[in-house]
Image (cartoon, helix red, strand yellow):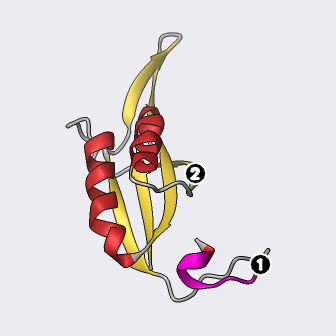
């Protein structure tokens, strides 16, 4: 099993959620986060004063999938989240050692 941490632009959340549901991925955890990469923030003008916003609002999705579904999920996320502009996001994939559903005690893929 793999844990996928997906960082996307906030307005792309619904597109990604719908696209993932179409391939059978229905469980995820969503976080509102802030960060920056190569874009390094931007400047804005407010009441005549310019100020810099260092951290850009993003959405982070945590999704756990079976090993055989990773490539399909990556493709779906890229196709649904990509704008072609800087700051589209990243996908981090790591191994999951064990999963346990608290309510039933199920483990592994049955717990997802």
Q: Which residue is mark 1?
A: 104
Q: Residue furthest left?
A: 84
10 or 22: which is nearer to us?
22
Picture quadrant where residue 92 is located: bottom left
- Taking 44 as reference, is 80 left or right? left
Up-down: is 103 above or below 20? below
Q: Residue furthest bottom?
A: 97
Inter-mark Cα distance, 1 to 2: 23 Å
Q: Report helix, strand or loop for mark 1.
A: loop
* Tags 1 and 2 touching, CB below 8 Å: no
Picture quadrant where residue 103 is located: bottom right
Count residues near mark 2 (Cα–Cα under 10 Å), then give few for <14, some for 14-19, many for 20+: some
78 or 42: which is nearer to us?
78
Q: Is residue 55 visible?
A: no
Residue 51: x, y in percent?
46, 28
Count residues near mark 1 (Cα–Cα under 10 Å), then give few for <14, some for 14-19, many for 20+: few
* Magenta segment: 105-110
Q: Which residue is mark 2?
A: 30
- The residue sitting at 50% across, 53% down in the picture is 60
Does the magenta portion include 56? no
- The residue sitting at 58% across, 51% down in the picture is 30
Q: Earlier in the sequence, mark 1 or mark 2?
A: 2
Question: Which quarter of the figure is the N terminus placed in?
Answer: bottom left
Q: Nearer the viewer, mark 1 or mark 2?
A: 1
């Amino acid at each position: 099993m793999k844990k996928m941490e997906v960082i996307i632009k906030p307005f792309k959340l619904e597109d990604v959620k719908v696209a993932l549901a179409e391939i059978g991925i229905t469980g995820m955890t969503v976080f509102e986060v802030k960060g920056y990469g190569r874009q390094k923030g931007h400047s804005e003008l407010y009441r005549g004063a310019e100020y810099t916003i260092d951290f850009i609002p993003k959405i982070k999705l945590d999704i756990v999938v079976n090993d055989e579904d990773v490539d399909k999920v990556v493709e779906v996320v890229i196709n649904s989240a990509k704008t072609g502009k800087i700051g589209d996001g990243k996908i981090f994939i790591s191994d999951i050692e064990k999963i346990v559903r608290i309510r039933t005690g199920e483990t592994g893929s049955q717990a997802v």
